Image (cartoon, grey):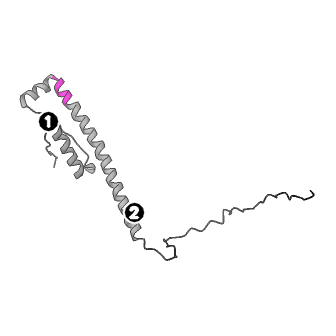
Amino acid sequence: DGTKVAEAQPTVEIYQAPSSEQKPSVPSSFHFVSVTGQKLDDTPLKDVVKERQEEMKIREQNRSNRMILTGIEGTLSKFVQHCIVQKEKHDVLLKNGYLSCRIRVPKQFVNESLKVELLKLVESLGASLVDDREP
């Protein structure tokens, strides 16, 4: 039919990477702007960040408490088993009517939540908790 179809020519764009002397400019600070371009107050954002940090602190404290309580529960279980099996300890148990087991928790890990959970654990075993901290 005689019509010529032009072949598509590939387009090549050349990009010059910045040299080591040309560093991209980094803003010293930033602020949020609305769709209209007005600067937005960042107070709500600061509140959210503060709230998230507090939540992370509480989660970490709860995780630490669970680890400590698991360790204490294991220690108490082994202690009771040991007292039942060993003749001397078993005789003391029969004579006194109770067992006495000391548990130490480093001061930096002690908090109100841990105290409450520890009290629940000890009471669930039918025991009582006595604070015998050394002065």
In this view, the mark in front (1 or 2): 2
Q: How many marks?
A: 2
User: Tag 2: residue type?
Assistant: Val
Of residues 17 and 6, which is closer to you in this image? 6
Crowd around label 1: few <14 · some 14–19 · many ≥20 (10 Å): few
The vertical placement of 126 against 33, above or below, is: above
Q: Residue at x 27, y 51 (%)?
A: 108
Q: Residue at x 13, y 44 (%)?
A: 130
> Measured from the top left, where is residue 34 in percent x and y?
49, 73
> Measured from the top left, where is residue 1 in percent x and y?
92, 56
Secondary structure of the residue carrying tag 1 is loop
The vertical placement of 45 against 54, above or below, is: below
User: Tag 1: residue type?
Assistant: Ser
**Which quadrant would residue 77 be assigned to in this image?**
top left
Residue 82 on the magenta segment: yes
Residue lying at the far front in this picture: please name it. 1
Q: Indicate left or right for 98 with 41 as reference.
A: left
Q: Indicate left or right for 56 with 34 as reference.
A: left
Highlighted magenta segment, given as a residue range:
80-86
Read off the residue under disc 2.
49
> Measured from the top left, where is residue 112 in percent x and y?
22, 52
Of residues 109 and 47, which is closer to you in this image? 47
Read off the residue under disc 1.
100
Q: Main secondary structure of the magenta part?
A: helix
Among numbered discs 1 and 2, the one appearing first in the sequence = 2
Residue 17 on the magenta segment: no
Secondary structure of the residue carrying tag 2 is helix
**Which quadrant would residue 101 be assigned to in this image?**
top left
> Measured from the top left, where is residue 54 in percent x and y?
34, 58
Residue lying at the far right in this picture: please name it. 2
